[in-house]
Amino acid sequence: MNKKINFYSVIIGTELLNGRRTDAHFPFLNKELLNRGWEHKASFVIEDDPKLMLEIFNLIKSDKNSVMFCFGGIGATPDDFTRVVAAKAFTDEKMEFHEDAKQRIIEQFCDEAYPYRINMAYLPVGAKLLKNVVNNVAGFYLEDRFFFTPGFPSMSQSMVIEALEKLYPKNIVKYRKTITINSSENDLISSMERIPSHLDFSSLPKIIGEQRRVVLSLAGYDKDEVDIYFQLFIDFCKTNKMYYELRDIFEQNI
């Protein structure tokens, strides 16, 4: 069975929560993941609160299959906490000036790199860099799965693509089957309960006039396994003389 990778996004910015700005990170990342056959496990939009940030990072770290994209808070102003909090969560608070990151900042800003901008090169120990196509101040990542990018989409989006292309370019294709049944969800729960938790399963009820319908979708990497458990719903429909429509296709988590 293919190992499932759980993608998380953490979007940091009080200005998003108070309505001064609109988030562009989630839709961009989500689209890029889906295009490669991946999908989100969860997404968090949080304020610039170091305690909350640390709790979220630790939560994500506790998932051994997690991959995280974090947006915002890696600048040089007093409210940019991400670099320090990342070190607390992932490197036992150990930080160092990354020589390559320092050199990029100096090349970009010359004398104006000091005294503040240079601090953006003070990163958790072991950090690798992501290229900033706008101003050459690098993003960074840890353990090939925890990625930290700026809050500006013009900078972060190319970093997301760089990271995915390098380390998570393509998931294997899932096999998905979909059935629409003239029934309520309640009638199908006993069959739903028999579906293994590692298979992707969804149930979407619809009401058209007085007619109740439910669209069931089942997906996994093992076609035979999906077929076996999907047959439960077909058998139920045949036994109870319920109308149904089928669709099955190889697709990328859509």
Image (cartoon, grey):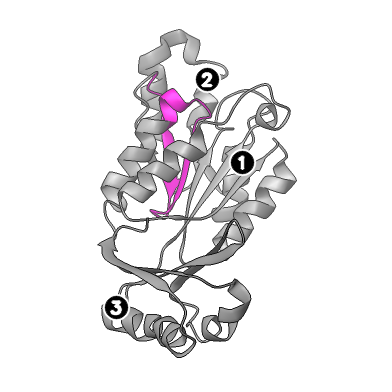
Instruction: Please state which amino acid type lies under the numbered disc 1.
Output: Val
Out of 177 and 238, give the one closest to the viewer: 238
Query: Is residue 79 part of the magenta span, yes or no?
Result: no
Above or below: residue 69 compared with residue 118:
below
Q: Is residue 52 left or right of residue 92?
A: right
- Residue shown at 43% from the left, 34% from the top: 139
Above or below: residue 224 compared with residue 91:
below
Q: Is residue 201 left or right of residue 56?
A: left
Instruction: Please state which amino acid type lies under the numbered disc 2.
Output: Arg
Image quadrant assignment for residue 104: top left
- Residue shown at 62% from the left, 58% from the top: 58
Q: Secondary structure at mark 2?
A: helix
Return the residue at label 3: 222
Read off the magenta span: 135-156
Mark 2 vs 3, N-terminal side: 2
Question: For residue 84, which numbered disc appears in the image?
Answer: 1
How dense is the environment of label 2, judged by Cα within 10 Å: few (below 14), some, or many (20 and up)? some
Return the residue at label 2: 117
Residue 204 percent location from the top left of the image: 54, 62
Instruction: Please state which amino acid type lies under the numbered disc 3.
Output: Asp
